[in-house]
Image (cartoon, rainbow, N blue to C red):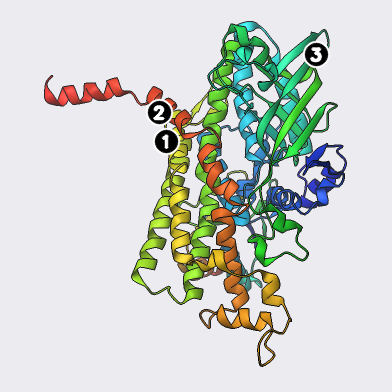
Amino acid sequence: MKCGVRFCGGCNPRYDRGTAYEIIKQNLQEKIQFEYAQEGVTYDILLVIGGCTNCCASYEQYIAKRGLIKIWDMDEIDKTIKILKDFE
Amino acid sequence: MLMTGAQYIESLRKLKTRVYLFGEEIENWVDHPMIRPSIDCVAVTYDLAHDPQYTDLMTAKSILNGETINRFCNIHQSTDDLRKKVKMQRLLGQKTASCFQRCVGMDSFNAVYSTTFEVDKKYGTTYHQNFLKYLKFVQENDLVVDGAMTDPKGDRGLAPSKQKDPDLFLRIVERRPDGIVIRGSKAHQTGSINSHEHLIMPTMAMGEEDKDYAVSFACPTDADGIYMIYGRQSCDTRKLEPDADVDLGNHKYGGQEALVVFDNVFIPNDRIFLCGEYDFATMLVERFAGYHRQSYGGCKVGVGDVIIGAAALAADYNGASKATHIKDKLIEMTHLNETLYCCGIACSAEGYPTAAGNYQIDLLLANVCKQNVTRFPYEIVRLAEDIAGGLMVTMPSERDFRSDLKVGKKGETIGDICNKYFAGSPTCTTEERMRVLRFLENICLGSAAVGYRTESMHGAGSPQAQRIMIARQGNIEGKKALAKAILDI
């Protein structure tokens, strides 16, 4: 499964977005191929990592066939990993 | 094309920019220790545009061709663009704790874009097409442009055309079939030396007798006849001390201002965006000032974030972080800083499309934003100084801390003595404590105070300029009507 990753711009993040991404990636690296989202590429899923509840990252320009997951809090990591693990 | 920071720095070396400092011409100004921190600061605006964690703020889509561009070259196409501009500025303030100098260009692009459209509509001129061509050149080459507005102004009580010395406002001295010749200067120009190009605008409202002063144009920074005299900053020569590091406060980044002189500079027709249409000077000034007053609700907030962090570290290193009054002061600093951000976001969210189609901020809220910026940073640094303690201005130099000169009866060196008596909490080294205190010294009253304090006061217009705009936009008559309605008057 291919997952495109899009960060918000990080103007005032309430947690370390980069660390959050690394944790998610390490937990799912055997099942999911992660890469920074690029226009014109089709992904199975798009992971949008915001630094606060606003989660203002633009993502409409990317193609994801099967859905979108947004994360804006360190506490969301476990839930996100579970959702991605269960994704068939 | 998105340049990297390294490519940007190399691009500056290709320019033949004339720079004067301490009465001498500086040949290699790119590597000069007093100038280089400000160049490295601009370079951050390039490098972050390549980092996936920041591209959502640092890049945008060109209004001209849909290509990805650095947001500093963007024409705002929505209120979302306006908000992201402020967020980008906060981010860069956090990363540099300095003025990163590129906002004036972005703000001038947007003001000139919309104003030229309306000038052309009234007068049938081709300034908007000229500007679109210029914008394409800027976006394709990812350039830094100094949006230059402020004239020296001479006697503030006199109009440009009434000054004893006519050069005190920048003006057209000759009109030729192929262009115009410009004479005068622009003062306080942030990042001018680090810019590839200059985009000039008139400085205030003008009458018919001032039409030679109602001029807007672009030219390369190294055009024939342009030179710059570097503005010195408090404690700036610390940067010339051998191996200076801790004593600089911020050894990575800094800001820059200069006087930019135009000594009969020729401007070709296709780079002219206003040429005597004096009735549009006010529109251009108000739009640029509005954008720039919005900008301060982002950049100063980012720098404020670093100051709050440094003050909290100083409290930790002093062993005072558990004191209730320290906690309360950090809360107050945060409250003030986030209030500035609220204004920056609010004037963006309430933006509107101009006749040209790009988005303009809400003028009342942007002026309220900047008015707060003339006050709150002063209170933030006052509280930072309170938390830091007097040591931030009485501490010996870093050379003393590193000195191996023996002065004690048991052979203790000056370095040993300094490290012994200036040690703080065991959670930090004496050098770490020094670094934080020197950072606060630099931002409160050293070279960075230029950007965080006085620029907050006078940059984008002095406080009274905002009060005039607040008076115009404040709708007092409407508020009277509200009171009358409630009171049946």
Total label count? 3
User: What residue do we see at 62% from left, 11% from top?
Assistant: B210
Q: Are marks 3 and 1 on the same chain?
A: yes
**Image location (x, y in percent) of residue B59:** 66, 44
- Sequence order check: which comes first, mark 3 or mark 1? 3
- On residue B179, which mark appears? 3
What is the chain identity of the residue bearing mark 1?
Answer: B
- Labelled pair 3, 1 in contact (Cβ < 8 Å): no
| Amino acid found under the numbered disc labelled 2 | Ile
Helix, strand or loop for disc 3: strand
- Labelled pair 2, 1 in contact (Cβ < 8 Å): yes
**Distance Cα–Cα, label 2 vs label 1:** 7 Å
User: Badge 3 local density, few (<14 within 10 Å), some, or many (20+)?
Assistant: some
Quick one: A88 or B355, which is closer to the camera?
Answer: B355
- On residue B266, which mark appears? none
- Where is B255 relative to B487, above or below? below
| Amino acid found under the numbered disc labelled 3 | Gly
Direction bottom: furthest residue: B410
What is the chain identity of the residue bearing mark 2?
Answer: B
Query: Label 1: which residue?
Result: B368
**Distance Cα–Cα, label 3 vs label 1:** 40 Å
Query: Label 2: which residue?
Result: B470
**Distance Cα–Cα, label 3 vs label 2:** 38 Å
| Amino acid found under the numbered disc labelled 1 | Val
Helix, strand or loop for disc 1: helix
User: What residue do we see at 28% from left, 22% from top?
Assistant: B478
User: What residue do we see at 68% from left, 34% from top?
Assistant: B62
Tell me if residue A47 can be seen. Answer: no
User: What residue do we see at 68% from left, 12% from top?
Assistant: B212
